[in-house]
C-alpha cells in the first residue's frame, strides 16, 4: 500500500520540474495508468508465485509448462495465457509508460544556460559518490528493463533524451547534474542489457521462451532454468 501511495506522489513531484507546466489532467492520467498497471502486475505476480509452488517453471512458456498440460479441460491454458499477457505485457506497459514519460519531463526540465555554468561550474559536476549511485541506479534499471520486458520502451526513452540534449544545445542550454545523472544511468543500463543479451545469446531454454529478433531474457526465467538444470 505504501508503494502505491508514495510512488504516484513522487511522479507528480517530478512532473513539476517540466519546463512547461503539465496540465493537471495529464498528471492525473499518468498516475491513474501507473497505479492500474502496477496493480495488474501485482495481481499477476501473486498468482504466478502460487503457480511456482505448484511446479510452474518460469523458463518455459505457459503452454509448455507440464502442469498446464495436465489441466482439464485443456482450454483452461488459454485463461492462464491471458493472465500472463495482462501481467507481463499490458500491466508492464501501463506501469512503465507513465514512469518513463515523467522521467523524460524531469530530464527536459534539468537544463541550465552556458552563463549559469560559467558562474557555478558545480551545477553540472558529478561527485565520486554520484558516480557510485549511477552504477547502483543502472543496475536497478537493468533489472526493470529485462524483468519487465520493456527494452523497446527504454530505448525510445533514451533516444528522446538524446534528442532533447541536441535540441537544447541549439539554445545554449546544457544538462545539469541531475540530467547528467539520468543520461549516464541510461547509458550504463544499455551497456548492461547488451552484456546480458550477449551472455545468454546461445542459451537454448531462453531462446525457446523468447523467440524472435528482439531477444531480452528475464533474469527470473534464467534463474529458474539454472535451478531446474541443477535439480536434474
Image (cartoon, rainbow, N blue to C red):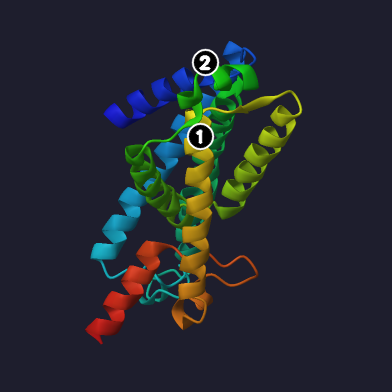
Packing grade of label 2 (10 A; few <14, some 14-19, many >=20) is: some
Residue 32 in view of the camera: no
User: Mark 1 or 2, which is nearer the eye?
Assistant: 2
Q: Which residue is mark 2?
A: 16
Q: Up-down: is 90 above or below 212?
A: above
Query: In the image, what residue occupies the spot 34% across and 41% down?
Result: 128
Q: Quarter holding the C terminus? A: bottom left
- What residue do we see at 56% from left, 22% from top? 117
For image coordinates 65% across by 69% down, the residue present is 213
> Which residue lies under the disc numbered 1?
99
Residue 176's spot in the image, x, y percent?
Answer: 53, 27
Q: In the image, what residue occupies the spot 62% across and 12% down?
A: 21
Q: Neighbour class for label 1 at 10 Å: few (<14), some, many (≥20)?
A: some
Q: Is residue 191 left or right of residue 163?
A: left
Looking at the rendering, which quadrant does residue 24 occupy?
top right
**Mark number displayed over residue 177:** none
Q: Position of residue 127 (x, y in %)?
A: 37, 36
Q: Judge by depth and name the residue closer to the eye, 32 or 16.
A: 16
In the depicted view, which residue is nearer to us: 76 or 148? 148
Residue 111 in view in this figure: yes
Q: Quadrant of the N terminus?
A: top left
Position above or below: 70 against 32: below
Q: Can you tell which quarter of the image residue 26 is in?
A: top right
| Image location (x, y in percent) of residue 85 | 52, 54
Q: Circle 1 sits in a helix, a strand or a loop, which is it?
A: helix
Kindly state the secondary structure of the residue where label 2 is placed.
Answer: loop
Q: For this view, does 154 lie left or right of residue 204?
A: right
**Residue 49, quarter of picture:** bottom left
Amino acid at each position: 500500500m505504501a508503494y502505491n501511495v508514495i510512488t504516484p506522489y513522487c511522479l507528480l513531484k517530478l512532473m513539476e520540474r517540466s519546463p512547461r507546466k503539465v496540465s493537471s489532467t495529464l498528471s492525473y492520467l499518468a498516475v491513474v495508468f501507473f497505479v492500474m498497471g502496477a496493480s495488474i502486475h501485482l495481481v499477476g505476480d501473486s498468482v504466478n508465485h502460487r503457480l511456482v509452488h505448484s511446479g510452474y517453471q518460469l523458463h518455459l512458456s505457459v503452454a509448455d509448462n507440464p502442469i498446464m498440460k495436465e489441466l482439464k479441460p485443456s482450454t483452461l491454458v488459454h485463461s492462464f495465457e491471458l493472465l500472463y499477457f495482462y501481467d507481463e505485457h499490458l500491466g508492464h506497459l501501463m506501469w512503465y509508460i507513465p514512469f518513463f514519460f515523467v522521467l523524460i519531463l524531469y530530464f527536459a526540465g534539468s537544463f541550465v544556460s552556458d552563463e549559469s555554468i560559467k558562474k557555478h561550474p558545480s551545477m553540472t559536476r558529478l561527485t565520486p559518490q554520484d558516480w557510485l549511485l549511477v552504477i547502483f541506479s543502472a543496475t536497478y534499471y537493468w533489472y526493470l528493463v529485462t524483468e519487465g520486458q520493456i527494452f523497446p520502451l527504454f530505448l525510445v526513452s533514451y533516444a528522446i533524451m538524446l534528442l532533447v540534449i541536441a535540441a537544447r544545445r541549439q539554445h545554449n542550454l546544457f544538462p545539469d547534474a541531475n540530467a547528467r545523472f539520468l543520461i549516464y544511468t541510461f547509458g550504463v543500463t544499455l551497456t548492461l542489457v547488451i552484456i546480458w543479451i550477449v551472455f545468454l545469446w546461445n542459451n537454448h531454454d531462453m531462446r525457446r521462451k523468447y523467440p524472435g529478433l528482439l531477444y531480452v531474457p528475464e533474469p527470473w526465467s534464467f534463474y529458474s532454468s539454472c535451478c531446474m538444470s541443477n535439480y536434474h
